[in-house]
Amino acid sequence: MSDSSRSIPIGKLLRADNSQFVAGCRVRELETPAFGSLVRASLEDQTDVYGLITNISINDDGLVRQLVSGVSLPGEYTADNRYNRNLPVEIHVLTIGYQSDGQIHHQLPPRPPLSLDQLFLCDSQEVARFTSHGLSYLRHILRLADQPVEELLVSHLAQARRVQDSLGNPDWYEAACQRLIVLLRDDYPRLTQVLDALSELE
């Protein structure tokens, strides 16, 4: 199992299935996670489920509706609502692999995380270990429907590329692009969209 002492806890699981899960957090914890970040849910059986943040949503509640209907709000009202109350912030995660008995697998896990399992933001060492195990996990990103897949790829690959470059692996990013070309070889319009989005990293 990963060393959670180095990882940053960012929330707890609300609901999950084998392919995706949702965690809840407070606004004050929202400064840490970002779209496309690699995260990990640690299960009681020593299994770690890895995923990418695909969406962060901030829902309203009764008090927020009352506050926004006011003509003007003192700054302390906004600060109190954001940082002292538990606003319903949800972090949506796409499952892209798991770790069991010290081995990384880029398949869907045997079972999903459970409610209230802790969600951690992966550190650079974990990002390096997961992405160095191969690139087959990229297929999970491409199967997303009704999601900004191209933007997710850009965000994730930018993070992974920085980590791999810092370890002296400059060829990793090129290999990732080649893998995407292979996976999308029968879908030229989508391949064009992905490559156009990735041009932002050049």
Image (cartoon, rainbow, N blue to C red):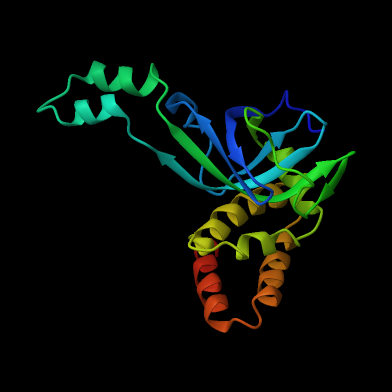
Question: Residue at horizontal 80%, vertical 58%?
Answer: 134
Residue 83 in which image quadrant: top left
Give residue 42's position: percent from left, percent from top.
73, 32
Residue 139: image x %, image y %? 68, 64
Q: Nearer the viewer, residue 81 or 20?
A: 20
Q: In the rendered view, does 111 fall on the left or right side of 192?
A: right
Is residue 75 something that shows in the picture?
A: yes
In this view, the residue in front, 6 or 53, is 53
118 over 141 or under it: above or below: above
Quarter of the image with the C terminus is bottom right
197 or 108: nearer the eye?
108
User: Is residue 67 toward the left or the right of residue 134 in the image?
Assistant: left
Q: Who's the residue at 57% across and 61% down the image? A: 144
- Where residue 39 appears, as percent x and y from the top left, is 64, 40
Q: At x 32% / y 21%, what residue is drawn?
A: 81
Q: Residue furthest left?
A: 71
Does residue 167 appear in the picture of this structure? no
Q: Relative to 23, is 87 on the left or the right?
A: left
Q: Is residue 32 above or below residue 110?
A: above
Residue drawn at x 48%, y 62% as measured from the top left: 146
Q: Is residue 181 above or below residue 162?
A: below
Q: Is residue 70 left or right of residue 8?
A: left
Residue reaching furthest to the right: 101
Total labels drawn: 0
Q: Report which quarter residue 82 is drawn in.
A: top left
Question: Where is the N terminus found, in terms of image quarters?
Answer: top right
- Viewer-proximal residue among 23 and 167: 23
